[in-house]
Structures are given as C-alpha cells and as structure tokens.
Amino acid sequence: MSQKVVVIGLGLIGGSISLAIKKEHQAKIVGCDINEEQLKLAQSLLVVDEYELDIHKAVVDADLIIVATPVLQTENILNLLLTCDLKEGAIITDVGSTKENIMENAHRFFHKGVVFIGGHPMAGSHKSGVSASKAHLFENAFYILTKGEQVSDEDVKNLRFWLNGTNANFIEMSPHEHDEIVGVISHFPHIIASSLVQLLQKRERKDIDVKRLAAGGFRDITRIASSNPTMWRDITLHNREVLIEVMDEWINEMSSIREIINDSSKEKIFSFFDDAKRYRDGLPEKKKGALPAFYDLYIDVVDHPGAIATVTAILAKDDINLTNIRIIETREDMFGVLCLSFRNDQELEVGKVLLEKNGFECYSAS
Ligand SMILES: NC(=O)C1=CN([C@@H]2O[C@H](COP(=O)(O)OP(=O)(O)OC[C@H]3O[C@@H](n4cnc5c(N)ncnc54)[C@H](O)[C@@H]3O)[C@@H](O)[C@H]2O)C=CC1
Ligand SMILES: O=C(O)C(=O)Cc1ccc(O)cc1
C-alpha cells in the first residue's frame, strides 16, 4: 500500500520539502493550509498530489506529518495533532526556526504511539509562498534535528530517510543549544538588517535620492529585511531571552566602538576592522552555512539592455542556469552593475571564467 505524507503549511519551506520528498519517494503528498488559494497553487504546480482543508481528516492515515507554519502557529497545530487520530508509528516533524518552545510538548506524542522530532532546515530565502519553493533549496545546507529522550536513533534514521531528497547535512543538537546558536547567527542579524533599514528611512532627505544611493552594498546586506514579518515576529517572540542577551552584548560592543571613534583612536579603529576581517575571512566558504550563501557575481556593464542579452547567451551556451538577474544602478544612467545569482559556487566560478574570457570585468562577493 502506498504511503502518505501530509504537509501542514504549504509555503516556501513546506513546498520545498514536499518537492524534495517527491524526488525520492512514491508516497502520496497531501497539503493542508488555511489559505486555499495557496493549496490550489501548490496542486497546480505539482508540489502536492491533493489538498485537504481539515487537518483532522488529512492526518488520520498519514505516515509522515510535516508542520511548516510560522512558529506560533506550529505550537497550536502540534496541540491540535495531539487531539487527532494518528496512525501508530507515524512520524511528525516541523521546520520551525526555533526549537525550545516547540519541543516542550514533544514527549506527549510518545504516549500517543507516534514520534515527534523537531527539525530546522537552515536554508531559505526572504521570499515566501509556495511559488518560491524549490526541490534543491536545502542542498548542502545544515538541517538541525532535535529529539526528545523517548525518540530512538532508528526513528531519526527513518525521518532522515524521508528527507533524503533534500541532500542536506543533518546534525543533532539540544533545543536549547539550537536556539542559542541560531539566535546569534540568524535571528539577531535579521533584527540588525531591519534596524539598518529603519535608520535609513528615518534619515531620508528631500534633496538627495538616498534610496538610489543605497542600492548597492546596503541593499545586499539588508536583503533579509525583506523577509516575512509574521514569521520573524513569531521567531523573535519564541527566542526572546536569547535575543535580549545578544542585544545587550551588542549594545556594549557598540558603546565601545563609539568610544574609540569618538576618541579618533586610529590604532583601535584599525584593530576593530582588522579583527573582524580576520575572523570573517576564516569562516568556511564553500559550504552553505546557516545563512544561505549568495552565489552572486557582479559585472560592470555599459548600455545594459544589450549587455544582459550577451551575458545570458554566453552562459546559456554552457548550460549554466541563473537563479536571479538584476541591475544595480548606483552610477550614471548609462552604466550599471549587473548582479547574476547562480545556483552554486561551482557554476559561479565557471560563469565567471566564461564571462572574463569574453571581456567582461567580473567580481564576486566572497
Ligand atoms: N523562510 C525561510 O527562509 C525559512 C523558514 N523556516 C521556518 O519555516 C516555517 C515556514 O516558513 P515559510 O515557508 O517561509 O513561510 P510561508 O509564509 O512561505 O508559508 C507558511 C504557510 O503556512 C500557512 N499557515 C499559517 N498558519 C497556518 C495554520 N494555522 N494552519 C495551516 N497553515 C497555516 C500560511 O498560509 C502559509 O502558506 C516557519 O516556521 C519558519 O520559521 C525555516 C527555515 C528557513
Ligand atoms: O534569506 C535568508 O538569508 C535567511 O536567513 C533564510 C532563513 C530564514 C530563517 C531560517 O530559520 C533559516 C534561514
């Protein structure tokens, strides 16, 4: 008899996991979401085989249930699942960016004869919705699993088998460790990115088009400020304590930097940048970290409409796919910087060599 997977919350992450499972398993995939339009879209994009609005009905004979909603909703859905009829031995997992609150009720599933294992695929995008989902979203990314005491290694192996198609690197840690680490490397940077944007907004001027000037580096480092506000509100509320702790450290750090700048302390200012550069340069480059790497290549172009066609033709000849293409206009109207996003580092390198051979000046951010 064929197996059944239910994905609750069919957005970017639910959709991407569904596609990754489809790649490797014959199981029927059923989507559940409060947004019926999203479900219809998921079905027409072949992300799911069927959809069902009633969670109770959908999960009754499911072998695997994946909860992929914003984390406050995930807590509610897990409570609802505790009241549902579930198949003996079914596996339930989630994809939430926080783990401590979500794992609080995990042990209760054990008494229902099912297994709950917390999950967090550490890759994604500032985009949301099922239309942005991709089977390869988690390729080479870390995928953190958190399991309660009652869960066996065999159960974890079964979940990993289901998720094989993600091609992710699975690692296990405690929910507390997870929230502390991810708080620093992912949650806090989102707060910083949004606060930088807020700062720019407050400093907008009537006389100069600040927004246009900020289109280059500022736009890149604040990309994550374009993420889904509901999702980030929920994450912030769940990881409040860690975030407050990190924020206090950051405020102290800012005060000391303020002091050395105020004192025009040449050596200390140099050390500040130099220490940060050394540590940052030592971060692993090739693998996907918790914050997805950008495989972006920048190309100086003059008269850009013609240049785009030339560039894409050069890459297409060698079957190199782009995931995004945009022009950053920070200079005069005739000029631009073309930013090409590749699927991975290897394709970026091949693309760079090809374009350089054809006389384009390229530089990458890494
Ligand atoms: N976006 C990202 O880059 C990443 C997100 N995550 C986590 O994945 C989860 C989902 O995020 P995305 O897919 O980006 O969000 P999304 O906004 O693309 O999708 C969430 C979906 O959940 C549905 N939903 C909301 N409440 C619901 C409920 N009560 N019942 C059923 N469906 C409901 C929404 O209608 C929407 O279709 C979040 O918990 C987030 O923390 C994890 C890794 C990366
Ligand atoms: O878009 C980005 O750079 C992200 O930071 C994506 C992301 C969002 C939430 C996560 O829990 C993990 C990754």
Image: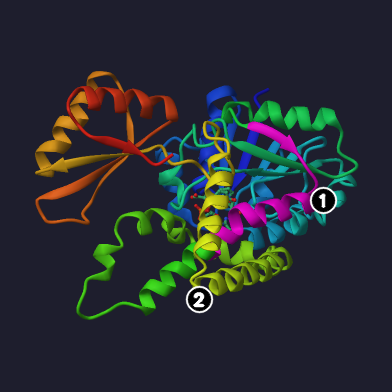
Which portion, as a residue range, is magenta?
Answer: 169-191
Residue type, numbered disc 1: Ala
Above or below, 248 against 184 in this view is below
**Residue 348 location (% of width, % of height):** 37, 29
Q: Give SS at disc 2.
A: helix
Q: 70 and 283: which one is in front?
A: 283
* Mark 2: few/some/many CA within 10 Å (<14, 14-19, 20+): few
* Nearer-N-terminus badge (2/1): 1
39 relative to 298 in the view: left or right: right
Residue 365 in which image quadrant: top left
Q: 275 and 149: which one is in front?
A: 275
- Say whether residue 131 is magenta: no
Q: Could you tell me which residue is drawn at 69 percent across and 33 percent down?
A: 170
Q: 49 and 360: which one is in front?
A: 360
Above or below, 140 against 241 in this view is above
Q: Give SS at disc 1.
A: helix
**Residue 168 location (% of width, % of height):** 61, 31
Q: Could you tell me which residue is drawn at 48 percent across and 62 percent down?
A: 193
Residue type, numbered disc 2: Asn
237 relative to 312 in the view: left or right: right
Above or below, 208 against 298 in this view is below
Residue 198 at least partly seen: yes
Q: Which mark is residue 202?
A: none
* Mark 1: few/some/many CA within 10 Å (<14, 14-19, 20+): many
Screen quadrant of the N terminus:
top right
Report the predominant secondary structure element of the magenta stretch. helix
